[in-house]
Amino acid sequence: MMKLKNILGITVVLMATVTLQAQTYNDSVRVRTWSVYMQGGISSYHGVRSELFDNSKRTMAPDLNLGVKYNIQPWVRLGVNAGYTMLKSSGNHSLSITTTDHNFLIGDRTGTLELKSDRLQNLNNTYLAGVDANADFNILEIWPKRKAQWLSLYAGAGVGYMRGWNRNSQTWSYNERATATGDAYFNGYSHSYLKSSEDKKHFNALYIPLSLSLEFDIQRQLTLGVIGQYKCIPTKSDFSPKGIYSAGVVIRYNFCKEQKQVTEEADCRFI
């Protein structure tokens, strides 16, 4: 019985020590502290509100973000994020159209014109820049006395505004064939040519960013993480997508408070 009491007593002392150290770490890193971060990865999209993106191959694009966060408490932080991403699509031989005109004049005769057009290339690039305000909640703080205070899982949401610049270029192949017939009369011609065009548009839209990030403190000042995001765009603007999803890595610098004496000789990553 005495051995059991001794074991329980030692266990309680160790748990109290770990809890004190962990709380000290949280207080110094995630209570009323600022951080700045850089985020990079890739993105894609769905539901672009433009027929020009139909029947085209969607390709991945770079996604870059810079921002600042303010930790109010270990379980909640507020931030402002500025981001840049792209919507990219390309299509080859993606559209073929044939039209017929039965009242086409060839000389002084009425004939038939058949025009066949094939889109050889359809390239869309939309450049997006946006700014949003957001709030993140540390899911792991459901267990505030956990030992691994250096590990955080943040779920975030916010609201933002973006501006997009669309550049669409297309190349078409045209083949014209016309004939006119009559009594002892025939006339006709065939003509083929290429034509390219470029069009530029822009749009403005509100968006709702949602995110989930897993972050690991390498040091008190340095945090690395991975993040997945989805931007919902309810605004029905031409050339805007219904949503953008992305994945990337995060590098964060924390402006920590001065570390307290109780943890100076400890490795905070394992507190």
Image (cartoon, rainbow, N blue to C red):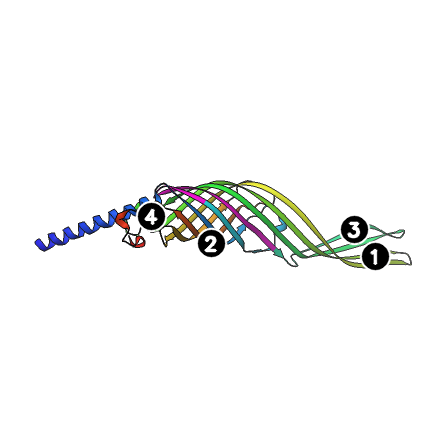
Q: CA distance from mark 3 to mark 2?
A: 54 Å
Q: Using the numbered discs, state the Cα–Cα distance from disc 4 to disc 1 in whole angstroms.
A: 76 Å
Disc nearer the start of the sequence (1/3): 3
Question: What is the residue that sits farthest to the left in this orientation?
Answer: 1
User: Residue drawn at (49%, 52%), measured in percent from left and top?
Assistant: 246
Pair 2/1: label in front = 2
Q: Which mark is residue 38?
A: none
Who comes first in sequence, dot 2 or dot 1?
Answer: 1
Which residue was labeled with disc 1? 179
Describe the element under mark 3 as helix, strand or loop. strand
Callout 4 crowding tier (Cα within 10 Å): few <14, some 14–19, many ≥20: some
Residues at discs 3 and 2 in contact (Cβ within 8 Å): no
Q: Which residues are magenta?
A: 68-89
Q: Earlier in the sequence, mark 4 or mark 1?
A: 4
Query: Residues under labels 3 and 4: Cα distance?
Result: 69 Å
Q: Is residue 77 covered in magenta?
A: yes
* Residue 215 locus on image (x, y percent): 39, 52
List the residue tagged with mark 4.
140
Q: Please, what secondary structure does the residue beneath circle 4 have?
A: helix
> Can you see residue 90?
yes
Label 1: few (<14), some or many (≥20) within 10 Å?
Answer: some
Q: Amino acid at mark 4?
A: Leu
Question: How far across and how far down the image is residue 259, in percent?
Answer: 31, 47
Q: Nearer the viewer, residue 259 or 136?
A: 259
For label 2, the residue is 248
Q: Residues within 10 Å of mark 2 (few under 14, many from 20)?
A: some
